[in-house]
Amino acid sequence: MPIAHLSHRTVIHIGGDAAGDFLERLVTSDVDHLAEGRVAPSALLTPQGKILFDFLISRRPGGGFVADIRADQADDFIRRLTMYRLRAAVTLSRDDSLTVSAGWDEAALPGALADARFPQQAGVVRIYGPVPARQADVDAWDRIRIVHGVAESGQDYALADAFPHDVLMDRNGGVDFRKGCFVGQEVVSRMQHRGTARRRLVLVESTLPLPPAGTPVMAGERAAGQLGSVEGSCGLAVVRTDRVAEALAESLPLTADGTVVSLALPAWSGLVFEQRGSAADD
């Protein structure tokens, strides 16, 4: 099993008698029914429904929860949760001594947690603890994410700039539309029920090496989005699916800095380019 140490990630322990109820009222995922032995995608949104923090959430042995988050966002995340905590019996503590690693391609190691963003057959797990001996580089981990259409903030989209639908959190279990209210719930629920999501994460491929992250993706002469994570001739991008669909219908080229590319919605999402909404540009 290749295992990559993710030094740009850290963990936050969320404990106390009220931790479950506290998180359930704030974040997008269904914390109450979070299964043991798994990490699930989740987010804390702005009141306008955009992703303020993205993280992975899991149950901590012995009680409480672990939030696996970008290290550069951890302190801000704690401050934001503290604003909402008031007098609730909830504890928040950053633990940089607990390393974060990701493994894939084999049966799970003892103590490893299945990463719910990936299909089971990919064998992707999260490991919290000492760095295992069988190490791969972070580029190899990014290739696994790209192949499976798994986006992360910073590399694939900017925080406070994307709705959960933009990065397929409505499709990978990152948003639960059946539970009660959470911050930003009204906006994302309206997008869900009206089908107005217009931007989506796509897989990008070319016969040539792709240009760097941030390069605009063009649908004919119109900008459709921009590249995120790139590894060789493969990458991810968040694009306007209506513009891509129009370009495909009119046989217009899809390009990135002059390089011809092909775009595909991840098969697991169940989406096709013809299913486009009528939301506002942003």
Image: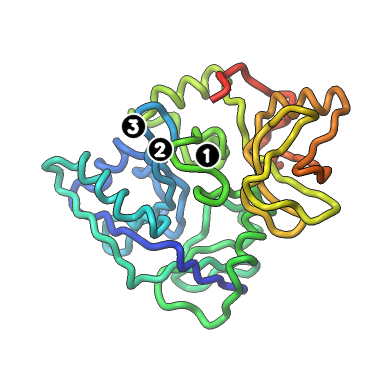
Snapshot quadrant of residue 43: top left
Badge 3 amino acid: Val
- Could you tell me which residue is drawn at 41 percent across and 68 percent down? 128
Kindly report the distance in space between the C-alpha atoms of the residues bearing marks 1 and 3.
15 Å
Q: Is residue 29 left or right of residue 192?
A: left
Mark nearest the camera among 2 and 3 is 3
- Could you tell me which residue is drawn at 52 percent across and 72 percent down? 109
| Element type where label 1 sits in the image | loop
- Could you tell me which residue is drawn at 39 percent across and 57 percent down? 72
Kindly report the distance in space between the C-alpha atoms of the residues bearing marks 1 and 2.
9 Å
Asked if labels 2 and 1 touch by Cβ distance under 8 angstroms, the answer is yes
Residue 133 screen position, x and y as percent: 53, 83
Q: Quadrant of the N terminus?
A: bottom right
* Vertical comparison of 115 with 251: above or below: below
| Element type where label 3 sits in the image | loop
Badge 1 amino acid: Met
Residue on which the image places disc 2 = 28
| Element type where label 2 sits in the image | loop
- Could you tell me which residue is drawn at 29 percent across and 54 percent down? 75
Residue on which the image places disc 1 = 169
N-terminal of the pair, mark 1 or mark 3, is 1
N-terminal of the pair, mark 1 or mark 2, is 2
Kindly report the distance in space between the C-alpha atoms of the residues bearing marks 2 and 3.
8 Å
Q: Crowdedness of circle 1 by 10 Å Cα count: few (<14), some, many (20+)?
A: many
Snapshot quadrant of residue 26: top left
Badge 2 amino acid: Thr
Q: Is residue 240 left or right of residue 196?
A: right
Residue on which the image places disc 3 = 183
Residue 278 screen position, x and y as percent: 61, 16
Asked if labels 3 and 1 touch by Cβ distance under 8 angstroms, the answer is no
How many marks are shown on the rendered structure? 3
